[in-house]
Amino acid sequence: MVKSGSDNLDDRRAAERSRMVEDQIAARGVRDPRVLEALRTVPRHRFIPGADRAEAYEDRPVAIGCGQTISQPYMVAVMTEWLDVDPAGRILEIGTGSGYQTAVLARLARHVITVERHRDLSDAARKMLSSLALDNIEFVVADGSLGCPGRAPYDGILVTAGAPRLAQALLDQLDEGGKLVAPVGGRDEQRLVRVTRAGDQFRQEFGIGCRFVPLLGAEGWPGTP
Ligand code: SAH
């Protein structure tokens, strides 16, 4: 059968994606086979608008509109691996952005609830993810710095914007044994933090340094609502 131009393009993107996983992610120590498979599968270029799409498989964040960015693939991989997603679990993501991280989570967990403060970004992500036939995702437009208490508790919480601190409201929404992964620190630079809940104890571990756009809101940085 003769392949159409778009089939060839999809093949080329898939090859770029495999290379991205090998060179940027596996080579830097991410091992979880489920995470690597999800990153090989989700078509990252489709989450990037227009002219910047050619940069989809490069090792850096890319602009997605509303002054926001799609996270660097390596950072998505590290955070997802650290969250240690239970296939039967429910995950809360704060900062839908392009929906790329959401898609990776939706391939690993039973259900994902994702919160974004920009309605335009949330709507665009919803369209993209339904076109990929990922139907285990709920989209919420709200200030996610306080989590999403109406749907709590969660087996995992992933924050993809830089927080000034770990809000107790967010920790309270973790289920027993649940994990939260978030970039915490200054407005421009943060460090990944993982919190694991055991009863009323919240064990903290510190990971790599990172640079996320700021988490704005009641428990985030001050900024336009
Ligand atoms: N995970 C995204 C990265 C998004 S960048 C991706 O893969 O594309 C961080 C996102 O967090 C931005 O879209 C920003 O608008 C959003 N954000 C910032 N503060 C927020 C808040 N308080 N509640 C919900 N979303 C917030």
Image (tube, rainbow, N blue to C red):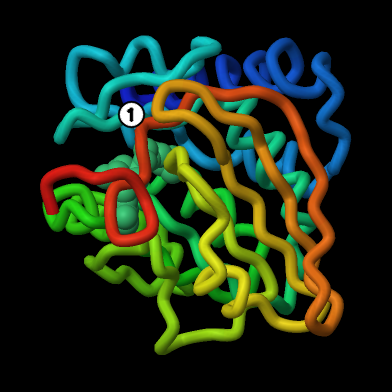
Residue drawn at (73%, 50%) of the image: 194
User: What x and y, as percent, mark residue 74?
Assistant: 64, 25
Can residue 1 be seen at all in this image of the molecule? no
Image position of 19 with respect to 126: above or below: above
Residue drawn at (50%, 73%) of the image: 169
The number of numbered discs placed on residues in the rendered structure image is 1
For disc 1, the marked residue is 69
Residue 203 appears left or right of 182: right
Image position of 17 with respect to 77: above or below: above
Q: Quadrant of the C terminus?
A: bottom left
**Mark 1: few/some/many CA within 10 Å (<14, 14-19, 20+):** some
Please identify the quarter of the rendering in which residue 198 is found: bottom right
Image position of 5 with respect to 101: above or below: above
**Disc 1 on helix, strand or loop?**
strand
User: What x and y, as percent, mark residue 171?
Assistant: 61, 70
User: What x and y, as percent, mark residue 96?
Assistant: 36, 52
In this view, the residue in front, 148 or 2, is: 148
Residue drawn at (51%, 51%) of the image: 159
In this view, the residue in front, 20 or 123, is: 123
Residue 78 appears left or right of 43: right
Q: Is mark 1 within 8 Å of ligand 1?
A: yes
In this view, the residue in front, 216 or 152, is: 216
User: What x and y, as percent, mark residue 41?
Assistant: 59, 40
Q: Amino acid at mark 1?
A: Thr
Can residue 143 be seen at all in this image of the molecule? yes
Image position of 195 with respect to 86: above or below: above
